[in-house]
Image (cartoon, rainbow, N blue to C red):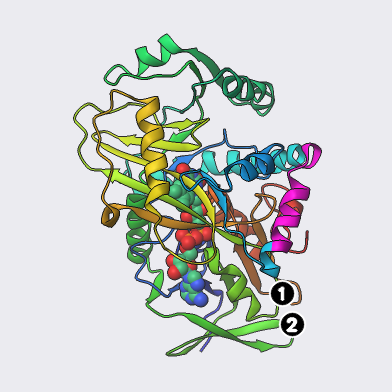
Amino acid sequence: MALSNHTIIAGGGIIGLCCAYYLHKDKHEVTVIDRTGITDNCSFGNMGYFSPSHFMPLAQPGIITEGLLHLFNSKSPFYIKPRLNKELLQWAWQFKRNARGKTALQNAVYLNNILQLSRGLINEVRKDIGDHFKMQEKGCFMLCRTNSGLRHEEELMPMAEQFGLQVEKLSRHKVQEMEEHVETNVIGAIWFKDDCHIHPGMFMNALKKYLQDIGVHFILHEEVTGFEKNGNSVSAVITQNQKLVADHFVIAAGSWLPQVASLLQTHILLQPGKGYSHTYDDVEKNILYPAILVEGRCAITPWQQMLRIGGTMEFSGLNHEILMRRMQGIYQNIKMYYPGLQIQMPEQENVWCGLRPVSPDGLPYIDKLPGYENVIMAGGHAMLGVSQCTGTGLLVSQMLQNKPTEIDMHPFRLNRF
Ligand SMILES: Cc1cc2nc3c(=O)[nH]c(=O)nc-3n(C[C@H](O)[C@H](O)[C@H](O)COP(=O)(O)OP(=O)(O)OC[C@H]3O[C@@H](n4cnc5c(N)ncnc54)[C@H](O)[C@@H]3O)c2cc1C
């Protein structure tokens, strides 16, 4: 029997759980279905940045050349496995179109809107669910080892300031002074002060527990395999074990969005972008600030004595195969920027990987499914799923009830390609 205002969410990553949080707040009866136990998906092992600073989408000028330069380097941070695949070719064509200067700048404005909305909301969520995920509000460094890298980052400063962000250029000495425990080897940095970082795995566990405690229902280890339709709406989802009736449906299936959308005859352009990370549990002399290593295109995040290193964007399809050469590339870059950091290259069994759901323009899909008045798609947040999770949750709950939305949703429509 359908409960009034019962919403089913397919997918329990950070996007699905944040949708559950806001829908429950808005008096919906909520059920989350995930084909796993929600103990490890892309939302767990990432770097944990809540980054309004990352307003430039992945599809930006220069990225194609960089990708081509790295194509045959197995340690490179950016890689597309060459293969003849219609979906990949369509995606790459749209990616190239969106990497043009004017389009990328326009997309940066849209991305900034949802990033800033989300950054504001995470403080409220923390108050609600409790401070269980090591959130720290100390900004993020963009560390540079070359003049061209530093110049590129500096060029973004006026735009950041126009968006209302606080930014400061730091000399090599200032960086070293702030990173007092570990020797660094950089020529300078740009410090984006509004960013914060969380421990994403702890956030996922805390949010899931909070949702369970307030009555959100979880159906785990069941996969959504179909939908039952009734005219221009969906009436039920089908899993391998049961049929579940509801009033509204949210599809938040991460890198599996195209597969789930195809069950409703909807075509989504999206590629899984694999990234790696490794976490050190106890670093005696640790860094104090999270940082992007600009030329190395990888990242580092400290949580007191814990430390995570990670990166790479590998387009090799839907698989969790670990290529240790890529992890080696990350490790070597970290050692180059922080020669004083006492960490060892991790063993393969301790390397994590996750699949970022990457849309061709780097903007998410948050929209009602064409032809269905009660189904919303929420995904495709690429490298910024953490940074956009709270905003996405709120926007989905507003759209689902046909309320005015906090920001313009037109850039996130499904049929933009
Ligand atoms: C190395 C790395 C570093 C990153 N760092 C950051 C960062 O610092 N900041 C940031 O903002 N972002 C970062 N990201 C990106 C971020 O992790 C992702 O954008 C985000 O996790 C995507 O969340 P999601 O909920 O859409 O997908 P997921 O977390 O993948 O969740 C999707 C869920 O859907 C479920 N599912 C799929 N199909 C079905 C089905 N048919 N039925 C039922 N369930 C289904 C899956 O089991 C999964 O649990 C990083 C990513 C990587 C890889």
**Classed neighbour count for the residue bearing mark 1: other residues with Cα under 10 Å, few (<14), some (14–19), many (≥20):** some
Can residue 98 be found in the magenta stretch? yes
Can you say whether 249 is above or below 64 in the image? Answer: below
Q: In which quadrant of the rendered image does the C terminus lie? A: bottom right
Question: In the rendered image, which residue does mark 1 sit on?
Answer: 373
Specify whether 202 is left or right of 108. left
Q: Who's the residue at 70% across and 72% down the image?
A: 267
Tell whether label 2 touches label 1 (CB within 8 Å). Answer: yes
Q: Is mark 2 within 8 Å of ligand 1?
A: no
Image coordinates of residue 243 in percent, x first then y, are 50, 89
Image coordinates of residue 136 in percent, x first then y, are 37, 33
Is residue 252 visible in the rendered structure shown here?
Answer: no
Query: In this orientation, which residue lies closer to the viewer: 81 or 107?
Result: 81
Query: In this orientation, which residue lies closer to the viewer: 9 or 358?
Result: 358
Q: Who's the residue at 41% across and 33% down the image?
A: 333
User: Of the residues shown, which amino acid type is indicated by label 1?
Assistant: Glu
Is residue 378 visible in the rendered structure shown here?
Answer: yes
Query: In this orientation, which residue lies closer to the viewer: 183 or 212?
Result: 183
Image coordinates of residue 284 in percent, x first then y, are 18, 30
Question: In the rendered image, which residue does mark 2 sit on?
Answer: 232
Disc 1 and disc 2: Cα gap in Å?
Answer: 6 Å
Q: Secondary structure at mark 1?
A: loop
Q: Who's the residue at 51% across and 29% down the image?
A: 194
Q: Secondary structure at mark 2?
A: loop
Q: Which residues are magenta?
A: 89-103
Q: Who's the residue at 62% across and 64% down the image?
A: 83
User: Of the residues shown, which amino acid type is indicated by label 2?
Assistant: Asn
Can you say whether 295 is above or below 237 in the image? Answer: above
Specify whether 104 is left or right of 245. right
Can you say whether 126 is above or below 171 in the image? Answer: below
